[in-house]
Image: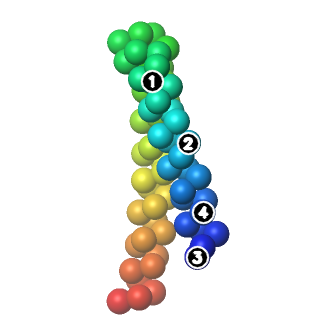
């Protein structure tokens, strides 16, 4: 499980970095808008992965 936790922490770091890039570029700029859409896709995929993991955990540990 610790390997999973480390992987999720790495993903959190990447997501935070993307939001910092958006902030640096300016959310109203073309680059900021593109980065925001990319971040949205990445964040939704990450949340889906976490949800799947937690759902499986809940099934195994009622």
Dot 1 lies on which element? helix
Dot 2 lies on which element? helix
Query: 13 left or right of 27?
Result: right
Where does residue 22 sit, x and y in percent of width and height? 45, 24
Answer few, some or many: residues within 10 Å of disc 3's Cα (few below 14, many 20 plus, some between 14 and 19): few
User: Label 3 vs label 4: CA separation?
Assistant: 9 Å
Residue at which label 1 appears: 22
Above or below, comparing residue 18 to residue 9 in the picture:
above
Residue at which label 4 appears: 6
Foreground of the two, 36 or 49: 36
| Mark 3 / mark 1, whichever is N-terminal | 3
Query: 42 left or right of 59?
Result: right
Query: 58 left or right of 16?
Result: left
| Mark 2 / mark 4, whichever is N-terminal | 4
Residue at which label 3 appears: 1
Q: How is the image coloured?
A: rainbow
């Amino acid at each position: 499980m610790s390997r999973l936790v480390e992987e999720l922490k790495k993903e959190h770091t990447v997501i935070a970095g993307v939001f910092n890039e958006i902030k640096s570029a300016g959310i109203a700029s073309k680059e900021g808008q593109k980065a925001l859409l990319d971040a949205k896709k990445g964040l939704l995929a990450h949340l889906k992965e976490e949800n799947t993991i937690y759902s499986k955990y809940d099934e195994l540990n009622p």
